[in-house]
Image: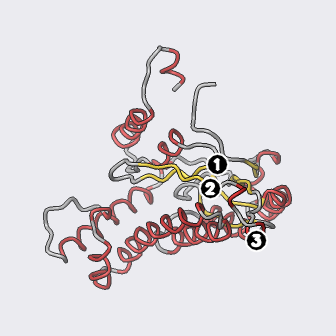
Amino acid sequence: MALEYANNLVISPTENIEYDRLIENEYLGLKNGIMDQSAILLSRHGCLMCMNCKTKDYKLVYQPKVLEYKESEQPKATSILLALSGLKQALTNSPGYNKRVAECQEAAKFLLEASGDYKTEPILSNVDPEIYEAHKHKLEPNLAKRAEHYFSENMRVMKGLEAWSLGKLKDFGMLITASGRSSIQNYECGCEPLIQLYEILLRAPGVLGARFSGAGFRGCCVAFVEADLATEAASFVRKEYLKVQPELASRIQNDNAVLICDSSECARVI
């Protein structure tokens, strides 16, 4: 965006999303999708951004206004915690990421062919949930886990949109945590430091839900936390992570180890 601004180029967010996909898929060789760049370029303050990565359709989901809640149902103010692991390895150096994509394609191919479809592109978004339910018991165990993560994650997204729009933030947080757990158990991504960080966040005061921020092979974990307990939660996470990963934790400046954030507008030139 800075390069575009400096060169007087007017490029739409959807065009930049596609340019980023081309760079990552074609140049870097990372078989990822468009979720990250879509969240960065299409989000709005206080909203959930929901995207169908197959059709590229998206919508912004607002919470009800404060006046619309009954007094007994007023949700607490929330913040976002970003807990850094100290791992900075590039995803392109981790064979696990692309391997998971290939396993999902293999699972999709099996499910489609089991239903008599030999022509459709083998990606899980092309497999109807009814076909998955009918044939999932035939999948090899590893492939069954990958497919289970995909289909259960889609269900969590739909439930999460409903919980958010109704102001049921505890339910929303529980779905975030379930997403993180499925990433570990079914998608089998992540690494020991990130899994430890995820588990520490779940024990922290006021945390409503947590998961990897991304695939969990490096980077950070993200948590949804009650705003009035965010500082206490951040301190707890810093101390507990230092106990289990002293070397990695020592690489991070203490003030930056756990960041207390709020949602904001999409990426823009200021």
Q: Amino acid at mark 2?
A: Gln
Report x, y in % for residue 163.
59, 66
Distance from the alpha carbon under mark 3 to that under mark 2: 27 Å
- Residue carrying label 2: 63
Colouring mode (rainbow / by chain / secondary structure / one colour): secondary structure
N-terminal-most mark, 3 or 2: 2
Question: Is residue 155 at all visible to an observer of this figure?
Answer: yes
- Asked if the residue at tag 3 contacts the one at tag 1, i.e. Cβ–Cβ closer than 8 Å, the answer is no
Question: Is residue 188 or residue 49 the one in the foreground?
Answer: 49
* Left or right: 63 in relation to 101: right
Considering the numbered disc 1 on the image, is that residue within a helix, a strand or a loop? loop
Q: CA distance from mark 1 to mark 3?
A: 25 Å
Residue under pointer 3:
203
Q: Secondary structure at mark 3?
A: helix
Q: Determine which residue is flagged by label 1.
A: 46
Residue in the image at 42% along x and 47% along y = 34
Tell me where residue 183 appears, x and y as whole percent. 52, 68
N-terminal of the pair, mark 1 or mark 3, is: 1
Q: Position of residue 95 (x, y in %)?
A: 43, 56
187 to the left or right of 87: left
Residue sitting at x 37%, y 50% = 31
Q: Amino acid at mark 3?
A: Arg
**Relative to residue 127, is residue 245 drawn left or right?**
right
Q: Residue at x 61, y 51 (%)?
A: 219
Identify the image quadrant of residue 110.
Answer: bottom left
> Where 259 falls versus 166 (above or below)?
above
